[in-house]
Image (cartoon, rainbow, N blue to C red):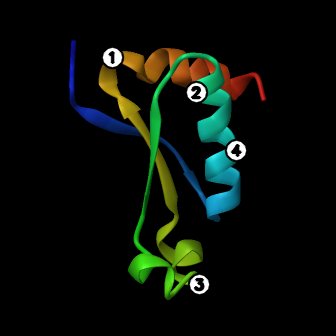
Amino acid sequence: MSEELVVIKIFSNETEATMSQQVLQESGVRGFIAKDDAGGMEPHLQRTTGVRLVVNRADAERAQEILNTL
């Protein structure tokens, strides 16, 4: 099984990313949120750098299918 992480979608805010992460977890796919907003002190950076939803490469295709149904 691959342990390499891949970005499956980039969101403009953490709320949307968290909702998609929850949908994946309910479907049995473990997702992680990656963001660079200075530890939450600079939330406006989410708009410029985005909030990335990442999964293991082995789960990427299934995760993409799940998110496409939303």
Question: In front of the other: label 3 or label 4?
Answer: 4
Residue denoted by label 4: 19
Structural crowding at the residue carrying mark 1, measured as other residues with C-alpha within 10 Å and reported as few (<14), some (14–19) or many (≥20): some
Tag 4 secondary structure = helix
Q: Amino acid at mark 2?
A: Gln
Question: In front of the other: label 4 or label 1?
Answer: 4
Q: Tell me which numbered mark, 4 or 2, is placed earlier along the sequence.
A: 4
Residue denoted by label 3: 44
Q: Give how far apart the Cα atoms at labels 2 and 3 are.
A: 27 Å
Task: Look at 47% across and 53% down and name the residue there.
Answer: 52
Structural crowding at the residue carrying mark 3, measured as other residues with C-alpha within 10 Å and reported as few (<14), some (14–19) or many (≥20): some
Q: Tell me which numbered mark, 2 or 3, is placed earlier along the sequence.
A: 2
**In this view, 51 is above or below 46:** above
Q: Amino acid at mark 3?
A: His
Q: Give how far apart the Cα atoms at labels 4 and 2 are.
A: 10 Å
Q: Amino acid at mark 4?
A: Met
Residue 69 drawn at (x, y percent): 75, 22
Q: Amino acid at mark 1?
A: Ala
Q: Tell me which numbered mark, 3 or 1, is placed earlier along the sequence.
A: 3
User: What is the count of numbered marks?
Assistant: 4
Question: In front of the other: label 1 or label 2?
Answer: 2
Q: Tell me which numbered mark, 1 or 2, is placed earlier along the sequence.
A: 2
